[in-house]
Amino acid sequence: MVEIKNIYGDVIYTAKDATTVKQAVEQAILSCANLSSADLSCANLSSANLSCANLYSANLSRANLYSANLSCANLSRANLSSADLSCCANLSSADLSSANLYSANLSRANLYSADLYSADLSRANLSCANLSRANLYSANLSCALIDKKTIANLRQINVSSYPYQIQAVLFLDGSRWIRMGCLWKSLEDWKRDGGILNSNPSEFPNDRSEKSKERAAAFAFAKAAALRMKLPKGEAKQ
């Protein structure tokens, strides 16, 4: 038997046949139990199916959520500080508004269409994370990392005519990078490699088609956004 308690010490669910916290949590979700404010700090929930779970204000700090399925879960105001959400953890369409993701590992996490409004992503690892259609309005990205580089500013760009992720990023070292789908390069490398029109000839040949032109226009928009970004006052290039 495994009991799940809330952050106040009260038992909110009892899984009589479970032997692990992971089994207990999955059983609770299958029974539509309300796990808001659950205390799951340091829990091993690797590869757990937590889809559509109500984990509002839950404590998941330092939890192992490696490859877990949290799609459409309510994680608003949840504490996920230092949690491991790497290796394709599925957070698509999850509500992470005002969640604490300080120093969380989100490397390769799927955050497609996630609501990250006012979330704290400071010092989080966002390397190769899918942020397509994610709401990052008012999110704190201070000292968040992509490929071990510290983010100064990040803009997620949504263009209906281009089906893949677009990001414009300014790092604290002053470098400006653009992500177009799986292509992730500095502005200098984009220019050196022949520009956007010749970057993906198999899927987007430079044939003057509307498809090619729209992709080029999306890139130009992202580039302009990156060039408008400024380093925080007092931050020297590192």
Image: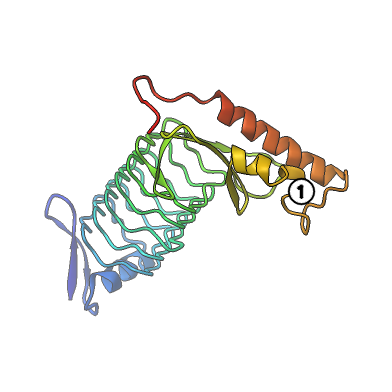
Tell me: residue 110, above or below residue 20.
above
In the picture shown, does residue 171 fall above or below 227?
below
Residue at 28% x, 70% y is 22
Q: Is 237 on the left or on the right of 176, as rendered? A: left
Q: In this rendered view, identify the residue nearer to me: 37 or 111.
A: 111
Provide the secondary structure element on which disc 1 rests: helix
Q: Which residue is mark 1?
A: 198
Residue 29 in the image, given as x and y percentages of width and height: 35, 64
Q: Quadrant of the N terminus?
A: bottom left
Residue ID at (21%, 78%): 19
Q: Amino acid at mark 1?
A: Asn
Q: Is residue 16 above or below residue 84?
A: below
Image spot of residue 47 (x, y percent)? 38, 70
Q: Is residue 113 visible?
A: yes
Counting from the top left corner in percent of width and height, residue 46 is at: 34, 68
Front residue of 96 and 36: 96
Q: Is residue 161 visible?
A: no
As drawn, is 155 to the left or to the right of 47?
Answer: right
Q: Viewed as shown, does residue 198 lie left or right of 29? A: right
Is residue 182 shown above or below 189? below
